[in-house]
Amino acid sequence: MSRIGTGWDIHKLVPGRDLVLGGVKIESPKGCLGHSDGDALIHAVIDAILGACSMGDIGTLFPDTDPQYKGISSTVLLSQVMDSVREKGFRIVNVDTTVILQSPKMGPYKDEIRSRMAKLLGVGEDCFCVKAKTAEHMLGELGTGDAVVCQAVCLID
């Protein structure tokens, strides 16, 4: 039986933090503010996977009030989720994502993100897609380059 889940995350961008998306460090003067490393793309993917498996959400599994997750790499969180997914007998079929970020441009990083995420998910690169959009200088902090939004859809069986 196939199942679909969706995920969405938003993070404010601030100076003094690394911008990490899909487990890849992006050259940027600002990075995601967050309890963990703030990887909004992985957070959206985790929620999509958890939704497809009816396993809750990232905030329930990894609450930002728990000091053990302070500064943790989101790749570690994704690895833990994937262990649980496999234990329940699920398999990732496909993940489709969109990064909405005014700047920097994501084009130079998309192949590296796709490769990294496919490896983390245990799927072929043809089973993970990352698209990039801007906010066309509209929509408040997103349009001014002070936030990033990531969306994900996951198909599992």
Image (cartoon, rainbow, N blue to C red):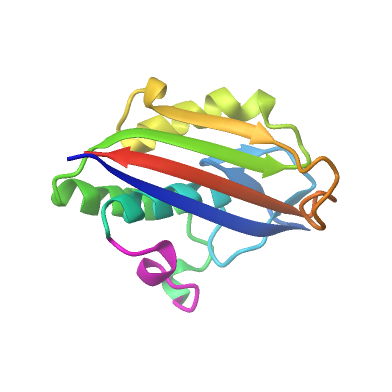
Residue at 33 percent of width and 38 percent of height: 155
- From the viewer's perspective, is residue 56 above or below residue 84? below
Q: How many marks?
A: 0
Residue at 68 percent of width and 31 percent of height: 106
Instruction: Please check the rendered image and state whether residue 58 is part of the magenta-colored stretch, yes or no.
Output: yes
- Point out residue 113 in the picture as x, y percentages from the top left corner: 53, 32
Majority secondary structure of magenta residues: loop
- From the viewer's perspective, is residue 9 above or below residue 34? above
Q: Quadrant of residue 141?
A: bottom right
Q: Residue furthest bottom?
A: 65
Q: Quadrant of residue 153?
A: top left
- Point out residue 2 in the picture as x, y percentages from the top left corner: 23, 39
Instruction: Please check the rendered image and state whether residue 106 is part of the magenta-colored stretch, yes or no.
Output: no
Magenta segment boundaries in residue numbering:
55-66
Left or right: residue 79 versus residue 74 is: left
Between 53 and 71, which is closer to the camera in this rendering?
Answer: 53
Between 25 and 7, which is closer to the camera in this rendering?
Answer: 7
Location of the N terminus (image quadrant): top left
- Point out residue 74 in the picture as x, y percentages from the top left corner: 47, 53
Question: Can I make out residue 139 in this image?
Answer: yes
- From the viewer's perspective, is residue 67 above or below residue 125? below
Residue at 40 percent of width and 67 percent of height: 62
Location of the C terminus (image quadrant): top left
- Point out residue 4 in the picture as x, y percentages from the top left corner: 33, 44
Question: Can I make out residue 76 in this image?
Answer: no
Between 16 and 109, which is closer to the camera in this rendering?
Answer: 109
Between 8 and 35, which is closer to the camera in this rendering?
Answer: 8
Left or right: residue 95 versus residue 151 is: left
